[in-house]
């Protein structure tokens, strides 16, 4: 009796290990993310949704803090992309990364004159001081926000369980 129970538990153990692999193979065949990729996408969207740079009103946002926050988003987007196996999700994450890099290349301190990045940041500038001043910065940030929302909507097509109430309130 004990050996029969042991054999059954071994078979059940093998089946329980094989079923998730078979499900992942079916999901991959039909273009759906594996369970691990789904979990990564859900976690990524949650982290993205926590970044206030994508939804705070402009008058409450700081240019210097925005740059720092976007650099953090670039870092965790890069990490998620490196671990992602689903091609559609990889394309969307790659698009997000391209938009982030373009924004950061334009507005990071390395490309801006030093006087822009003193303790005042752009907030201390007067209109007309610089044609690429605060208005251009926030216009570019607005365009980046729009692009990020579009890419997140694409990720939601890949993984419908993604929730991002701050970025896409209609998905609540």
Image (cartoon, grey):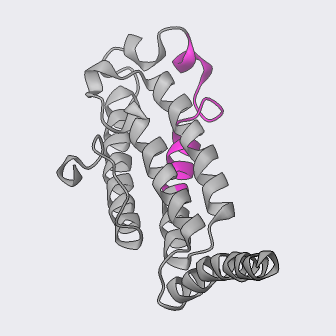
The extreme front residue here reads 1
The extreme left residue here reads 170
Front one among 144 and 162: 162
- x then y, percent, for residue 28: 55, 85
Which quarter shows the N terminus?
bottom right
Front one among 127 and 31: 31
Q: Is residue 114 magenta?
A: yes
How many numbered marks have been drawn onto this rendered protein structure? 0
Q: Is residue 98 visible?
A: no
Helix, strand or loop for the magenta stretch, by majority: helix
The extreme right residue here reads 3
Q: Is residue 9 visible?
A: yes
Residue drawn at the location 52% of the way across and 32% of the way down: 69
- x then y, percent, for residue 117: 56, 18
Q: Quadrant of residue 14?
A: bottom right
- x then y, percent, for residue 44: 51, 51
Front one among 14 and 126: 14
Residue 135 in the image: above or below residue 106: above
Magenta residues? 97-118
Lateral position of residue 21 relative to residue 87, left or right:
right
Q: Quadrant of residue 71?
A: top right
Residue drawn at the location 44% of the way across and 25% of the way down: 63
Residue 39 in the image: above or below residue 5: above
Q: Is residue 120 magenta?
A: no
- x then y, percent, for residue 57: 25, 28
Q: Quadrant of residue 7?
A: bottom right
Front one among 66 and 162: 162
Residue drawn at the location 36% of the way across and 61% of the way down: 161
């Amino acid at each position: 009796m004990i050996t029969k129970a042991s054999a059954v538990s071994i078979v059940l153990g093998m089946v329980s290990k094989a079923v998730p692999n078979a499900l992942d193979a079916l999901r991959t065949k039909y273009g759906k993310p594996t369970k691990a990729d789904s979990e990564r996408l859900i976690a990524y969207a949650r982290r993205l949704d926590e970044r206030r740079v994508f939804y705070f009103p402009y008058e409450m946002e700081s240019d210097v803090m925005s740059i720092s926050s976007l650099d953090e988003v670039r870092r965790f987007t890069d990490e998620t992309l490196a671990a992602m196996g689903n091609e559609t999700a990889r394309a969307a994450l790659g698009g997000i990364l391209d938009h982030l890099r373009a924004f950061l290349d334009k507005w990071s301190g390395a490309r801006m004159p030093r006087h822009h990045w003193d303790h005042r940041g752009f907030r201390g500038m007067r209109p007309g001081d610089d044609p690429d001043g605060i208005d251009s910065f926030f216009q570019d940030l607005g365009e980046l926000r729009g692009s990020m929302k579009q890419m997140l909507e694409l990720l939601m097509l890949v993984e419908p369980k993604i929730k991002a109430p701050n970025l896409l309130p209609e998905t609540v």
